[in-house]
Image (cartoon, grey):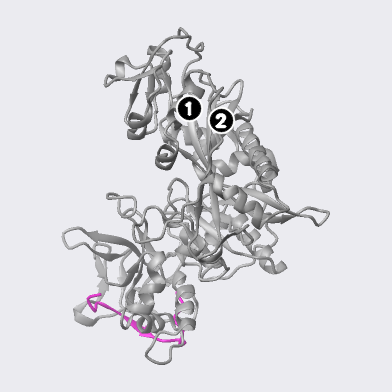
């Protein structure tokens, strides 16, 4: 800040933005400034900028950072070396001070939201429902440095307090109350935490936002039994591994019988009008499966407002924040586990995904990219790695959707496994290699590989009371219920019955320990996400006929002899 405004007095030792007895920032007449008019604009420096997953490491390693943050936040700090207790306190308190922005361009990693804390001046500006100032992050590209812009909303006299609205732009009184919880504690225990399926208008709005145009009704395409299909694709794995004699490649989209696109197709209406016999690798409205908030919504058709047993309890932070806060507080009062995982609606590879037991953290994450929050699996079934110990693992199945009506669903018999690298425990929540399983995108991280036919006997050795055949039967039943729910209603509330559509999805899941009413312990599948056009690199490497099997099942209706199981 340029010294035009100052911290006027300290009402108590601990600065707590939003509190009634905190530091105040007032307009002064220093430097000749006698008032602030609406045309004024000021810059506030940032004291700390980070991505959440790097925060602990920076506090431990950057000289002076922990000391400065502790002073800024009013956290007791003794000694020169960072203590684990002081670091934990700062990591909790920072959600009262954090602000966020994200870049619109760059790699997926570069687009992950950035969190920052304004300098001592900016961090002491208090909340007001009728603020005198507004703030916004400003990224100066030539120097690649960020500031916060501060400007008055009305004429101000010397001595008036500088305030801003911590829930700027939020008109709904209940959601404002939730968003202000980090600074103004409130009890929402009496609010219902029930989350019924959204109304039809919700799905219609999603369709319009996606700019997807539904197809006209067409008859199924009929090709001669010896027809050689011309495939137009931009998927390199298909180009490299599809060798079936009934398929050839063309570089002309206009000549293709099959469009196998990496990106999402939008104009189904035009395709249905102009080329109804052209087959393609996706369904209209399949975002209901592949986008996490939609997946949670349609799953309630199976399990009611609480959702089915095979999906962790999930809340859409944009539309269901009050219900989540109520549910969190209810669990807290009952002394139940309250670890949660925040996930972006539509990102893969665990990007911008965070595990926390802090209600304030979840509330503030709502301000970055659109997110859901799901109950973190606190009792996962573990796999014993002799070199490490009991680690988390997840399982990926490839499912093949042949048609919606009638519903024809297959699963590839081979599945893939991913493992954490450190023993599981409900601590060190920002330790990626303890809590996550996606290790194949960082060359410096160990990637544990176990083939499915090696995994099954080892799993049964570790859990002799749980034969894999019975565990897999539960997994397949979850898949049936999921796709039946997705196809139960007409578009845009369900997948569209377009006869020329086929699709390949990867379903990622974990197993957790659960108890039946009779006290019997069971392994309950937990669906984590459904992926469109998944990376099939491992499938192709270990099973060179993978895409031949997929194309035979989906486009030739010839699944005999292919390693697939028909589910529906």
Mark 1 lies on a secondary structure that is helix
Res 78 label: none
Horizontal and vertical percent position of residue 262: 36, 33
Horizontal and vertical percent position of residue 126: 42, 73
In the figure, residue 141 lies in which quadrant? bottom left
For image coordinates 37% across by 31% down, the residue present is 241
State the separation of the CA atoms marked 2 and 1. Answer: 8 Å
Tell me if 545 is positioned left or right of 413 in this view. left
State the extent of the magenta-drawn residues as a range: 1-17
For image coordinates 48% across by 29% down, the residue present is 503
Tell me if 426 is positioned left or right of 346 in this view. right
Res 564 label: 2
Question: In the rendered image of this protein, does residue 263 appear above or below residue 109?
Answer: above
Horizontal and vertical percent position of residue 286: 50, 33
Residue 312 appears in the picture as rendered: no
Residue 146 appears in the picture as rendered: yes
Instruction: Count neighbours of disc 2 (C-alpha within 10 A) and say few if under 14, some if 14 to 19, many if 20 or more.
Output: some
Asked if labels 1 and 2 touch by Cβ distance under 8 angstroms, the answer is yes
Quadrant where the N terminus is found in the figure: bottom left
């Amino acid at each position: 800040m340029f010294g035009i405004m100052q911290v006027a007095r300290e009402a108590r030792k601990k600065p707590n933005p939003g509190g009634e007895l905190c530091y105040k920032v007032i307009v002064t007449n220093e430097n000749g400034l006698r008032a602030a008019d609406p045309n004024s604009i000021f810059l506030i420096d940032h004291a700390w900028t980070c991505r959440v997953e790097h925060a602990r490491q920076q506090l431990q390693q950057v000289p002076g950072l922990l000391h400065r943050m502790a002073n800024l936040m009013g956290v007791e700090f003794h000694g020169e070396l960072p203590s684990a207790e002081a670091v934990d306190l700062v990591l909790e308190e920072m959600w009262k001070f954090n602000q966020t922005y994200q870049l619109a361009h760059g790699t997926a990693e570069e687009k992950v939201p950035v969190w920052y804390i304004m300098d001592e001046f900016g961090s002491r500006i208090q909340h007001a429902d009728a603020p005198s100032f507004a703030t916004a992050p400003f990224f100066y590209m030539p120097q690649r440095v960020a500031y916060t812009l501060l400007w008055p909303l009305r004429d101000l006299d010397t001595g008036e307090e500088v305030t801003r609205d911590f829930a700027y732009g939020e008109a709904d009184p209940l959601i404002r109350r939730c968003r202000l919880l980090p600074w103004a504690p409130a009890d929402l225990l009496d609010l219902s935490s029930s989350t019924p399926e959204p109304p039809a208008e919700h799905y219609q709005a999603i369709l319009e936002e996606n700019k997807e145009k539904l197809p006209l009704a067409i008859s199924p395409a009929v090709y001669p039994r010896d027809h050689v299909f011309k495939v137009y694709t931009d998927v390199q794995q298909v180009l490299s591994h599809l060798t079936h004699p009934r398929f050839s490649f063309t570089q002309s989209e206009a000549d293709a019988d099959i469009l196998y696109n990496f990106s999402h197709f939008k104009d189904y209406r035009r395709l249905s009008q102009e080329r109804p016999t052209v087959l393609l690798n996706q369904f209209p409205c399949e975002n209901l499966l592949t986008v996490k908030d939609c997946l949670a919504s349609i799953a309630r058709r199976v399990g009611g407002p609480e959702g089915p047993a095979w999906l962790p309890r999930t809340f859409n932070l944009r539309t269901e924040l009050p219900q989540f806060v109520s549910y969190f507080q209810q669990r807290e009062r009952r002394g139940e586990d309250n670890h949660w995982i925040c996930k972006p609606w539509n990102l893969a590879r665990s990007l911008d995904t965070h595990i926390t037991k802090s209600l304030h953290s979840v509330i503030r994450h709502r301000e970055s990219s659109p997110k859901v929050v799901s109950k973190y699996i606190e009792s996962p079934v573990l796999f014993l790695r002799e070199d490490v110990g009991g680690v988390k693992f997840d399982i990926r199945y490839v499912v093949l959707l042949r048609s919606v009506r009638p519903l024809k669903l297959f699963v590839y018999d081979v599945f893939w496994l991913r493992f954490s690298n450190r023993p599981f425990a409900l601590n060190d929540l920002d330790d990626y290699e303890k809590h996550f399983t996606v290790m194949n995108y960082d060359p410096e991280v160990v990637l544990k590989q176990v083939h499915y036919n090696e995994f099954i006997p080892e799993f049964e050795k570790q859990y002799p009371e749980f034969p894999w055949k019975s565990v897999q039967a539960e997994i397949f039943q979850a898949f049936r219920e999921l796709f039946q729910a997705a196809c139960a209603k007409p578009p845009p509330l369900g997948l569209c019955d377009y006869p020329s559509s086929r699709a390949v999805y990867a379903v990622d899941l974990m197993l957790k320990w659960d108890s039946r009413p009779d006290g019997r312990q069971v392994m309950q599948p937990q669906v984590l996400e459904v992926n469109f056009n998944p990376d099939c690199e491992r499938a192709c490497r270990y099973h060179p006929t993978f895409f031949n099997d997929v194309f035979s099942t989906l486009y030739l209706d010839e699944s005999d002899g292919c390693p697939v199981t028909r589910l529906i």
